[in-house]
Structure formats: structure tokens, C-alpha cells
Image: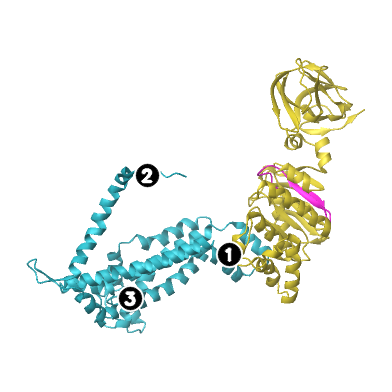
Chain colours: A cyan, B yellow
Amino acid sequence: MEKTWNNKAWFLVLPVLVLVAFSAVIPLMTVVNYSVQDTFGNNQFFWAGTEWFEELLGSSRFWQAMGRNLVFSAIILAIEVPLGILIALNMPKKGWGVPVCLVLMALPLLIPWNVVGTIWQVFGRSDIGLFGYYLNKLGFNYNYVQDPLDAWFTVIIMDVWHWTSLVVLLCYAGLVSIPDAFYQAAKIDGASRWAVFRYIQLPKMQRVLLIAVLLRFMDSFMIYTEPFVVTGGGPGNSTTFLSIDLVKMALGQFDLGPAAAMSLVYFLIILLLSWVFYTVMTNYDAER
Amino acid sequence: MARIDLDHIRHSYLPNPQKETDFALKEVHHTFQDGGAYALLGPSGCGKTTLLNIISGLLHPSHGKLLFNGHDVTKLSTQERNIAQVFQFPVIYDTMTVYDNLAFPLRNRGVPEGDVDRKVRETLDMIGLADWAKRKARGLTADQKQKISLGRGLVRSDVNAILFDEPLTVIDPHMKWVLRSQLKQLHRRFGYTMVYVTHDQTEALTFADQVVVMYDGGIVQIGTPAELFERPKHTFVGYFIGSPGMNVLPVEVEGKTAKFGSLAIVLPGAPEKTGGSMELGIRPEYVRLGRVGIGVSISKVEDVGRHKVVRAKLEGREIAAIVGEDEEIPAEPKLRFEPAGINVYADSWRVEMRA
């Protein structure tokens, strides 16, 4: 087929280009600008080259925050995905239970993140919080302000409470799309409950599960608000994840250069991981 | 293989059925002979799938008993009844290979792997997918997938019956013919009891020895394709089977004549029962168009290839006639009813005529 070349068509894309430039490219470039310079205020800038990047990649503080973040993501994925599948499998498929369950599931997703943080901050307090108080009553020495393990426990439970619903809803959508005939055929073939899950439900959920893992991974890798409200990154640095560390560096210490370098590295990591997921997903689609 | 007896079976989806209309399936009392090929034919919502699911055990009837070879299986689960069913949309296990798909029902029943292999290979040959054994089932075409669904039934040598629920709906027209004739072959070679649900008359008439026509939750006629064509028991069967369907004209019967408006039509015999609303049914194949008979005005001629369908107006009512492809339609056309093709209905049910 003959293609029509018409350079006027560029004008049609122009509005989007301008919008993207303002919302993404220009802010990103200012960050690039900061990352290669040093400033002591008064709008005086000195060329620093790759110094901040070298410093960042050589600093144990960065790698520790990264490590904590990866461990955090791994733990919440390991809990939320199986738990989400389990809940979705047990949700009713028809009747009055469906809207009730869906609303209950959607509730945590509708709460603003800082409110979630505040809820758990109060909930977990050992003096007045329902959760913390009774844990201590039951004989557990629980105090998320002082004990790093307790702080992790709280942050993880909070994330599971907040986000498992997302996995549930995605899986549920996958499950209800399976026609009845599949279950009937499985009955006729004499399939066990496990075989039905393994060969019918799981394959049909594969795609939504992949999306769920991707979303939960990216979100948890960028987590900021909730742990910031609950623990503030502490005790010590024990719950200081990458984004919390970044904010500390940029706004706490006002080290704009290193913070800009860190933002870029952080951005590249997310970009790389998104690309990996995207490739995996499109390959999977092509295979179908 | 088994003989299937439906003993006064009725079914309602309501918890407490009272009236006749509460039943999705009105009383069915019939026997499917061992090794027979049956079709359940009827429009959507006539209860044919309900009846099929009752046989397969996916549904349990609210009244009546179901017997396989004389044994009461009404309370048994689908698995225990040992039947195979092919659904409207192909059901395959995407992540498995073709081979594993067929092995699945056997492995679930704990059949030794040696026997599984032998049976699966036999079945692959039967359905003509031997070359595809190692392929993932996901990438196959709709008709191949449907063959796998069928194969999962055939692989169990001891199935009591194979049930089909509109299995060719998603298959391309040219493959429909191929699959249908392969089904017939399988039936002839292995003598399975087969029950085939469809709303397509061609499918039903070509597949089955006996066609069960259903309408509004009940069986209206059971018969061979020829019987359904020549002697429709109910006007619905007349409409539903045939293309175009039977002409049904409201008449008044007096002895051996039927009065239709100002016309008097001579019947081959006097109906045994009169009264109620009487109708005369005649298939377009038995309506002759020529220079003798009753004058009509032609409104439309449809040339369908093998023959022509003529739509005419007779006493203000639409009537269809079939005319040979090469026959000419006269300038002043006249209609004649062939006596052999005349059926008389009282309140929609056919009545016999005495000569």
C-alpha cells in the first residue's frame, strides 16, 4: 500500500509533545542539571561531573536502602499474591454476596495513603492502639517505635491490609471470566479440586496475576507515605526505603546534587524493571 | 454403552414449582436406545440443554428418575455416571499438550500409565490428531480444539453415552460438514449412544436416526427425519423443520372438505376429530403452481439455486410454494395442493384422516 507522507500531521501530535515536555521532560532535565553540579545556595552552581553518581554507587547507605526495599517488595509479594488468590477463589460468584465482598475488598484501596499510615500509626501504639495494646496484653513485647523487627512487622501488615485487595480484585476478574463449561468439563473428566485450580483457574488468571505482580512490585518499590507516617524510616534506619532516603537527602540535608543523582538512578531502576515486565508480558501474549 | 431411560422426568429451576409454566422441562418419558444417535432439536430456551444436563448429571431433575441400563442413576454425580460431554465452546486445558489433554481424564481416574498411552494413541488416530500430540493445545484451531473435547470423551472406553451441546456453533461452515461426517463414522464404527443438542435442523436431520423436537419445555415429536417432514405432529414441527416451513392455513372442516375463506379444499379423508381451531398444513414442496387450480397473486420469487421459492397471496394470506429451478411460472398462476402432502391440525395437534 502507498503511504501518504504529510508533514502537517506533526501538528496533530504537537499538543501531546508540549504536554509531555512540561510534565515530564523539563522536570527530568532539571534533575539531570542538578545531578552534575554542586550548589551552596545563592543560585551558584559548580560543575561536579559524575562525582555524585560515583559517590552514590559507592555508598553503603544507598545499597542498604535498596536492599531493604527489595526485601520489603519480596515479602509483600510472597504474602499478597497467594493470599489474594486464596481470597478470590473463596469469594462468591453470584448472589447478594458478590457486591458485599466487592465493596469490602475495595474499601482499603479507597483510603488515602497518609490516612492508612495514620490509622496504623495509632492502631499499633502500645499505649492507646487497639492492636498494639492487646498484643502487649497477650504477652508479646511489641513496640514498633523501638524494635526494628516490630517496625517491619507493622509496615508489612499495613501494606498487606492496604493492597491485598488489589490482587484479589484482579484475580476475581480473571476467575469470573471462566465459562461454566470448563468446570463442567472438569467434573466430567473427573478432575480433583487441585487439578481444577492448576489446569483451569491458574492458567486463566496468569495474565491478571502478571499485572498484579507488576503493579504491586512497582508500588512497593516506590513506597513512601505509609512507612514515613508510621515509622519515619526508623527506628534508626531500619525502615528507611529508597524513597524515604531520597527525601531525607534532598529535603532533610538539602544535598540537591546527590539527591538528583539518586533520583536518576532510582528512575532508571524502575524503568528497567518495567521494561523487563513489559517484555515478559508481551512475549507471553505473542505465545498465545 | 448404555440404554438411557427417562422416567417421567420434569425439571424446574424454581425451588417450589406449582404451575405447569414453572417447569423449564415438562414431563419427559422416553428411552434412548443403546447405540442410537439422537438429536434434540428446538429453538433457544426450549429446554433441550436442560434435558441434556439432566442426562449428564450436571443438573438433577426435580421430578422423575433416570436409568442407565436399568440402573437408577438419578442421584449419581456426573463422574459416577461415566458420560462424556462436548460443549458449545471448546473446552481444552491450554497449558497442556494435546496428548496430555486426552490423558487427563484417564490419569484423574488412576489408570496405569501404560494403558493411558495405548488409549491416548488410539484416540489420537480416531480423531485424526496423531501428528499434533506433542503440540500445546492452546494454538489449535476451533475445530481441532473441539476434536480434543470429543477425544477426552472417547478416550474412556467405558463411557455410557456421549452428549453434544451444540458442538459446531463456533466451527467454520466447511469444517462443520467434515466434523459431522466424522462423528457419523465414529458412531457407525463404535456404536456409541449419542445425544446431540442443536437448533440447526440440517445438523439434526443429517446426524440423527431419531430426532426429538422440543418446544416450550416439552417434547412435541420424536421421529425419523422423514416422519418429521411428512407428518409433523404439531404445527410447530411444521414451521420449524423445512425451509421454508410448512404453510398453515386456518380452515373450517366439514366432512372431507376444508373451507379456507371462500375456497373449498378437498381433503384425502375426513379428520377423526373436529372442533376447536382447525388448521390445514401443507409443505411448500406439495404446493403445485401451474395453469389449473386456484388463482393467486405472486408477491415474490426467491431463487435459492436448486429451486425457486414462490411467495404468493391466497385469500389475503401468505403462502409459499417450491418450484423447480427450470420450471416456468405462468403469467396467470394457479395453485393446487397435492393430497399426499395435506395434514390437518386441531388445536395445533395433528389429527388422522379416514379415507
**Picture quadrant where residue B316 is located:** top right
**Picture quadrant where residue A38 is located:** bottom left
Which span of residues is magenta-colored? B28-48
Residue B238 pos. (x, y %): 76, 34
Please give the name of the residue rendered at 73% of the width and 28% of the height, measured from the top-left corner.
B309
Residue A124 is left or right of residue B192, and the answer is: left
Disc 3 from disc 1: Cα separation: 34 Å
Disc 1 from disc 2: Cα separation: 49 Å
Label number found at residue A69: 3
Residue at which label 2 appears: A5
Residue at which label 1 appears: A200
Residue A2 is left or right of residue B89, and the answer is: left
**In this view of the protein, can residue B23 be seen by the observer?**
no
Quarter that holds the C terminus of chain B: top right
Give me the chain letter of mark 2.
Answer: A
Q: Is residue B35 magenta?
A: yes
How many dots with numbers? 3
Give the residue type that dot 2 points to. Answer: Trp
Q: Could you tell which of marks 3 and 1 lies nearer the N-terminus?
A: 3
Which secondary structure, mark 1? helix
Which secondary structure, mark 3? helix
